[in-house]
Amino acid sequence: MDQIVIQGGHALRGEVRTSGAKNSALPILASTILGGGEYVLTNMPRVVDVLTMGKLLGMLGVAVSHDGNRTVVQAHGITSTEAPYDLVRTMRASVLVLGPLVARWGEATVSLPGGCAIGSRPVNFHLAGLEKLGAKVEIEHGYIKATARRLKGARIYFDTPSVTGTENLMMAAVLADGTTVLENAAKEPEISDLAEFLNKRGARIAGAGTDMVTIEGVTALHGADHDVIPDRIEAGTYLVAGAITRGEVTVEACRPGHMEALLVKLRESGVELLEEKERIRLKAPGRLKGTNVRTCPHPGFPTDMQAQFVALMAVAEGTSVVTETIFESRFMHVEELRRMGADIRVEGNRVVVTGKERLTGAPVMASDLRASAGLILAGLAAEGTTEVSRVYHLDRGYERLEEKLQALGGRIERRKGK
Ligand code: EPZ
């Protein structure tokens, strides 16, 4: 297995370009099952999860070809309605094919995703919503079996906002008979991006990006091209890389408006930020000060930036409290940061971080995508050498991370596994 090796203690300087958003590319690819011909998708991130979704669509009979950050999808028909366990267990977002399959082809057999390192992550909202739309849903042998002649519009209320839950049911409702209203829906920018793509293809979605989304069902969609939005989590990760190394970094091709909660917290910790339309300049001249953070659904502080921010607070002055409200076990990075000398106490769903002047490099292990990003950032700030193993987690959601960090002056390299 590959490892990433970092010589820490060097301030990052320069420009870095943001790739397209993984969490937008995945539902956009899944939505091509709703049919309609050919799609040219640009600014697609070259990450493992996008390749996995392409493979899944291929298994269903949808042709997907990638050329750099451009993906062409031919969705003229399908040959299967089954998403197998072996693939779904490698990527939970595979559940996003459920809504489109039932809506367009009247049936779907999708493996239940199962548990995950960061939490139990059930899909009960997705299933209850499909039943509200008139589908018959059963669980058999670890698979969701859903059937429907034609879905029927309905009012669906989410107990708590769910990103892929909102996306799955929004896609299903596009071809339903009548009007669907999603209440207490998630408001993440990736949901608005998906709705924009669907509306270009003839869907009638209003209110995406708010907690009330209304979908007027239509009978068919046509093809369209789309440029995927920038990845706000990747952009945020590079901003924290600049801050944790006390450097000066400009993140290009990003959308500051999608990252306000993070920018507020970075400023609170003492970072200087200059926001332009699609660029953020960061300056972190000295040692930062601790600040408290609470993860929340968008537009609150994103849980996908929590691990990176805990790493930053580990070298800030004073004490910070970071509270995780979305996933019940998303502190796997804490033990590894402690191995690097961090002073962090876990108390239920929050951590109390007492900042240290310096961390020391150590061999550490990644447990999930964002935890691995947090460990890389800690390694960039630490004295000496850090070796991060199980970096396959990282490749799922970051395009060419070590190359981009090298371009900013980071002493980082990938060591190929045997
Ligand atoms: C999406 O996951 C993202 N994944 C996650 O990013 C992100 O962490 C998460 O939203 C929260 O922002 C993709 O977009 C592919 P949720 P999702 O449904 O949709 C509970 C990354 O690092 N819930 O919004 O699976 C759930 O357990 C990944 O890129 C139910 O109880 O998250 C959680 O506590 C990690 N029942 C809360 O809701 C349901 O049916 C929010 O989860 C659905 C969710």
Image (cartoon, rainbow, N blue to C red):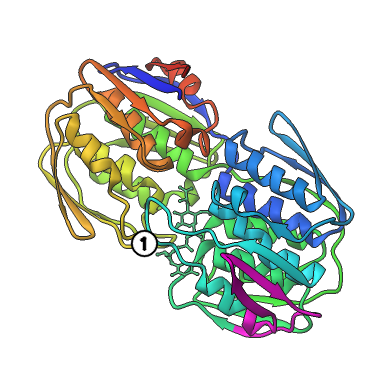
288 relative to 187 in the view: left or right: left
SS at circle 1 = loop
Q: Does 159 appear above or below 110?
A: below
At 30% from the left and 19% from the top, the residue drawn is 11
Residue 246 shows up from this direction:
no
20 relative to 362 in the view: left or right: right
- Range drawn in magenta: 131-155
Find residue 215 and report its image quarter.
Answer: bottom right
Q: Residue 346: percent from the left, percent from the top? A: 16, 52
Label 1 CB-ligand 1 distance < 8 A: yes
332 relative to 88 in the view: left or right: left
Q: Does 166 appear above or below 82?
A: below
At 65% from the left and 62% from the top, the residue drawn is 110
**Residue type at tag 1:** Ile
The number of discs equals 1
Give yes or no for residue 141 being in the magenta stretch: yes
Q: Residue 159: percent from the left, percent from the top? A: 44, 78
Find residue 40 and report its image quarter.
Answer: top right
Q: Residue 319: percent from the left, percent from the top? A: 11, 45
At 46% from the left and 37% from the top, the residue drawn is 393
- Label 1: which residue? 326
Give yes or no for residue 161 being in the magenta stretch: no
Residue 276 shows up from this direction:
yes
